[in-house]
Image: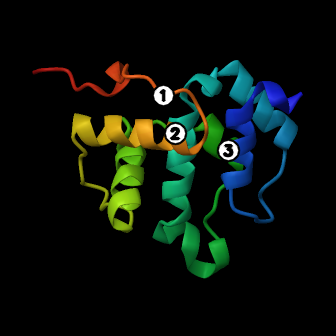
Amino acid sequence: MTDDYPGFDTFWRAWPSHDRKSQKRKCRQRWVKDNLEAIAAQVVARVLHDRECRDWTESDGQYIPAPLVWLNGQKWDDDGEALAWWERRQKHATAPPEPDHRASDDERAEGLRSLRQALGMPVDDDVSPFKMSAG
């Protein structure tokens, strides 16, 4: 039952319609196995970010990967950069950052709070996964 995984439902709706958008059941199994519900905001933020990137928008989406391939490759794991992009976009309607842009801890934390709020997810102050280690 997908009601148990609202983050997955949001992920699936956010994924662009394309002939490679398939294998929903296997994607959900991967979602559950990798406990992605716990970081759903980060995963969805990366999808929203990638939807606007050149690779996904050029040539009628020729380079949009299959969602299962994307999940298997952990393409969502970006140290919170997409969350920071989400926050900037909400404030300034900006394009995705250049690949070498590194967001601050505050940008990532605000992006996480903002996206969780937009998705109706619990918002808390624990943003420790996005704290940079010293040295």
Asked which secondary structure carries label 2, the reply is helix
Residue occupied by mark 2: 117
Which quarter of the picture shows residue 19? bottom right
Query: Would you place residue 3 above or below residue 133 in this image?
Result: below
Asked which secondary structure carries label 1, the reply is loop
Q: Where residue 83 sits in the image (x, y, percent)? A: 41, 44
Pick the front one: 40 or 110: 110
Q: Where residue 116 sits in the image (x, y, percent)? A: 52, 37
Quarter occupied by the C terminus? top left
Q: Contact (CB < 8 A) between labels 1 and 2?
A: yes
**Residue 83 showing in the rendered view:** yes
Q: Which mark is residue 123?
A: 1
Does residue 69 appear to the left or right of 57 in the view shown? Answer: right
- What's the distance in space between the residues labelled 1 and 3, CA to CA? 18 Å
Residue displayed at 58% across by 22% down: 38
Does residue 119 appear to the left or right of 9 in the view shown? Answer: left
**Residue 75 showing in the rendered view:** no
Q: Where residue 68 sits in the image (x, y, percent)? A: 72, 42
Which quarter of the picture shows residue 99? bottom left
The type of residue carrying mark 1 is Val
Residue occupied by mark 3: 11
Q: Estimate how packed mark 3 is, as few (under 14), some (14 to 19) or many (20 or more) residues with alpha carbons within 10 Å.
A: many
Query: Would you place residue 123 above or below residue 57 in this image?
Result: above
The mark nearer the N terminus, 1 or 3, is 3
Q: How many marks?
A: 3
Q: Where residue 96 sits in the image (x, y, percent)? A: 38, 62
Which residue is situated farthest in the bottom direction here? 59
